[in-house]
Image (spheres, grey):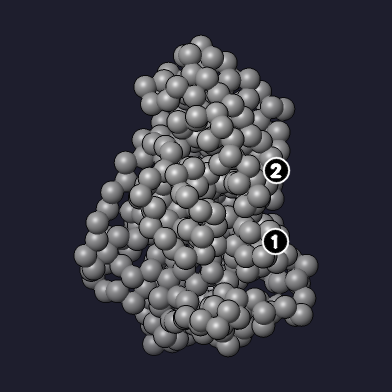
Amino acid sequence: MLNFDFYSPARLLFGKDTEKQIGELLKPHAHKVLLHYGGGSIKKSGLYDTVTASLKKSGVAYVELGGVVPNPRLSLVHEGIALCKKENVDLILAVGGGSAIDSAKAIAMGVYYPGDVWEIYEDGKEIEKALPVATILTIPAAGSEASGDTVVTNEEKQLKYGYGSPRLRPLLSVMNPELFFTLPKNQIANGVADMMSHVFERYFTNTTHTDLTDGLCETVLKTIMKNAPAVLDDPKNYDAWCEVGFGGTVAHNGLVGMGRAQDWACHGMEHELSAIYDVAHGAGLAVLTPAWMQYVYKDNVNMFVQFATNVMGVEGSFRDPDAIVQEGIARLRGFFRRMGLPATLKELGIDGSKLELMAKKATGAEFGDESAIGGLKPLLWQDVLAIYKLAQ
C-alpha cells in the first residue's frame, strides 16, 4: 500500500426533504449566492421553487445562471465568472447533476484567477483560492458532489479537460433520492456506467497489499450493479435509489482509491469522444471499458481474475485464468446491455474517420508533447488507437 493523504470535508445531507433546508444551511456561509442549473427541468419539477423559497425565507440573496448542458461548456463558465464578479457573489449553489456541479467549480476558481480559467485546465496550474460551492444533486453519476474534480469542454477547440484541487470539494451537498424519480432511463444507465468507471479507474492497479480498498471497490461495484436494474425497472424505487446514489458518491470521493496507484486511461480516452462527438460520458465509458480490459488484462491477469470472481461472480479453474477473465468481461458487457447502454462506437454514431486524431489528442501526440496515459498499462497513441478499434 502506498502513502496517502485523505481529506474529505464535504458535508453530505442525505434523505427525504433535505433540499428544503438549503437556505438555513447556506445562511452562515453566504449573503448572496449564484444559483446555477441546467436546462430548466428543475423548474418543471418544482425544485426551483422549493430552493428559491428556502433561500428567501433564510434571507439569502441570489442571482441565477441556467443553461448548463452535458459536457459543460467553457463559454457558460466565462459568463458565470463575469456574473459572480459583477454581483459580488460569495458562494455558488449548483442544482443538477455532475455537469452543473463541474461548471460551478470552474466558475468558483475562475473568479479569483487573473487570466482565462481555461489556462488552469490546460496547464494544470495550482489554484490558491476558489469560491465555496454547495450542491443539490438531481442526477447521481459523476460523484462531483463530494469530489475536488471538475471537467469542462472548450467547444471552440474541441477539447475536454479535467482538473482537481482540494479547494474545489463542495462545502456541503444535499442528496434526496426522491429527486431522481423522474430521470429518463438513458440518464439512469449513463450515470451508472460513470460511477462504475470511477471505481474501475481506481480498482485496476499494480499496487499490492490493498485488501481494504480492494474490498471497498468490490462492494461499491456490487451494490450499484445489484440496485441499478431495480431503479431502471422502477424509477420510483426509493430504497434502490438510496443504494445507487450513495454508491455514486463513495465511488468518487477518493476513499476507494487510497493507497493505490490509479489508472484513468478510460476517462482520458472517453473525453476525446465527448469533445468531438458530444456523446454522453457514461455511454462512452460503457463502450470503451470492456475494450480497454480486453487490451490490457494480460499485463496484470491476476487483478482481472480477482475482478471476474469477486465482482462478476465467475467460477472456473484458476489453471485457466484467461477463460475466467474473458467471462468476466463478457458479463460486464451483458450488464451494460441490460441497462440499455451501447456496446460499440458505431452505436454512438462514431465512425473510423477520427480515431487516430482522438488517440493522438488523448496522449498529447497531436500537440507534439506525448505522454502515456493509464497506470496499470501505460498507453501511447498507438495503444489508444488499438482500443478504439476494438470498440468499433
Q: Residue at x 58, y 20 (%)?
A: 52
User: Residue 57 in the image: x percent, y percent?
Assistant: 51, 11
Q: Residue at x 60, y 67 (%)?
A: 270
Q: Residues within 10 Å of mark 2 (few under 14, many from 20)?
A: few
Q: Nearer the viewer, residue 325 or 190?
A: 190
User: Residue 46 in the image: x percent, y percent?
Assistant: 66, 23
Residue 339 appears left or right of 198: right
The disc, 2 or 1, on the residue closer to the chain's N-terminal end is 1
Q: Residue at x 42, y 25 (%)?
A: 30
Residue 300 appears left or right of 1: right
Q: Nearer the viewer, residue 259 or 117?
A: 117
User: In which quadrant is the N terminus drawn?
Assistant: bottom left
* Residue 29 visible in the shown view: yes
Residue 4 appears left or right of 285: left
Residue 225 appears left or right of 301: right
Tell me which amino acid carries mark 1.
Glu
Say which element carries label 2. loop
User: Residue 303 in the image: x percent, y percent?
Assistant: 38, 76
Q: Residue at x 55, y 28 (%)?
A: 87
Cα distance in 3D space between marks 2 and 1: 29 Å
- In the picture of the structure, the residue carrying the numbered disc 2 is 184
* Residue 220 visible in the shown view: no
- In the picture of the structure, the residue carrying the numbered disc 1 is 156
Say which element carries label 1. loop
